[in-house]
Image (cartoon, rainbow, N blue to C red):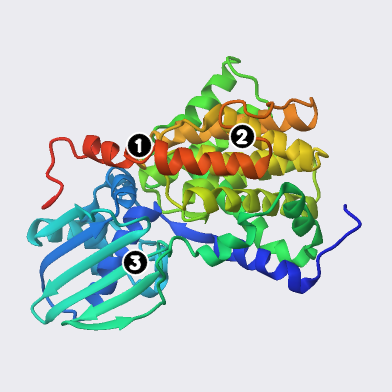
Amino acid sequence: MNGTMLSREAREPFLRMLRRHTFVTVGCTDPVAVGLAAAAAYRLTGGNVRRIVVEMDRNIYKDAISVGIPGTMEIGLPLAVALAILRGDPDEGLRLLRGVTADDVVRAKECVQAWPMEFRAAGEEPPIYVRALVETDRGVGEAVIRGGHDRIVETVTNGVCTVLAQETAEDDGDPDLLDVVSGCSMEDLLLAVESFDMEELDFLAEGVDMNLAAAKAGERGGCGTSSSPVGLGLGAQYAFLARESFLRDDLVNRVKRKVAAAADARMAGCDVPIFGCYGSGNHGITLFLTVGLAARHYQASWEATNRALALSLLIVGVIKSRTGILTPHCGCAVAAGTGAAGGIAWLQGGRAREIENAVHLMMGNLTGMLCDGAKYGCALKMATSAGAAVESAAMAALGGAFLPERNGIVGRNFQHSMDNLRKITDVGMRDVDRSVLEILLDGEPSEGTR
């Protein structure tokens, strides 16, 4: 470790950011957030539902259309909204759909047929934004989520508004906390990570065990009464290829198998909790399983594992300070996988230069990977990202590999590369979400969707 250490006061903002951007969720965060807004709006009046209108930013919309709803093994925003209103407790936040039963699904499907529902994109609203209006025979309730999937900032009951959280013009994923790391060099991040007391990071280890349990659910298949593969079944495919000796059962393929299996379970709608980060359960799967499995492979201590996880998360924080929480590119590759590469490089003895090189190898490899919505196929991208993270870390920390400056979007240093990433995200990929949403809604109206 470095001889210089940050004081408790100096490292506290970093710790607050780590806690702010890690969470537990059941189900994909985007349809769950839509359900949360609807449930919060309905609770304001209660009664018999007459009409539901939900508008959301394009990124939330594209991620909510084709992904499994927890406990149902089915997809569809109307089903998520109906379930949330029927049996979801808004006070549970992103866990409001845990414990869904078969009877709940039957009742929710009846409501989907009976309740007029409209879903539409919300113009130029930045991520993360959902506004749900629920009209009943007792009145009209509205709830607004902004800046975080579970962050209800405003409710309106029969025209009377209550502000629940202070909004700012730049409110996007709690920027005051992302600003903690926005200008940090890799040396700054290392100093923070190596200054933490061991017990301050204990909460991170839960993420590895929780997401491993999700991987086991995906490997078992079914997540219910059936034993057939769930989601894309990619975790099972990797296991099959290893048994057939087509793939080696090494760290890279083991990480890809576990990450894919957890993604299979989550994207299919299995009722399994996920330890997520930066607004995404899939980010959490990619980061915590990749770093956690690498740490076990290298027989790292509990303390070293937690510090590697913390470093990975802080690197992702710097990335998100440039791109925002939701992005047109695949955050599991550009953010979570890249952060994981940095954490693993540190586990292998890398210092700031080697960790930065691992980050640059990931940027030069996977930055162009598109986010085309949450769906079964996310398992493919997550597995690719996880495998590339292990390889990039080893090449940088053990083999001395690096990309020279001004090599594509890789800049002079970590911060310069982050600025280049911002330009790609904000300017180069500005219309990607609009195009993806048009593709996903092909054949369906953007309003009045049932």
Residue for point 48% across, 48% down:
323
Residue for point 64% across, 57% down:
181
Report which residue position mark 1 lands on: 372
Task: Confirm whether residue 103 shows in the render.
Answer: no
Q: Nearer the viewer, residue 282 or 148?
A: 148
> Identity of the amino acid at label 2?
Val
Mark closer to the observer (3, 2):
3
Q: 10 Å neighbourhood of mark 1: few (<14), some, or many (≥20)?
A: many
Q: Nearer the N terminus, badge 1 or badge 2? A: 2
Q: Nearer the N terminus, badge 1 or badge 3? A: 3
Residue 184 located left or right of residue 4 = left
Position above or below: 340 against 14: above
From the top left corner, tell me how far across and down residue 88 is, in percent: 31, 68
- The answer for how far apart the CA atoms under marks 1 and 2 are is 23 Å
Q: 10 Å neighbourhood of mark 3: few (<14), some, or many (≥20)?
A: many
Report which residue position mark 2 lands on: 255
From the top left corner, tell me how far across and down residue 218 is, in percent: 47, 40
Position above or below: 271 against 286: below
From the top left corner, tell me how far across and down residue 46 is, in percent: 18, 79
Residue for point 48% across, 46% down:
282
Q: Is the C-beta separation of discs 1 and 3 under 8 Å?
A: no
Which numbered circle lies on residue 145? Answer: 3
> Identity of the amino acid at label 1?
Asp
Position above or below: 207 against 411: below
Q: What is the count of numbered marks?
A: 3
Name which quarter of the figure residue 242 lies in. top right
> Identity of the amino acid at label 3?
Ile
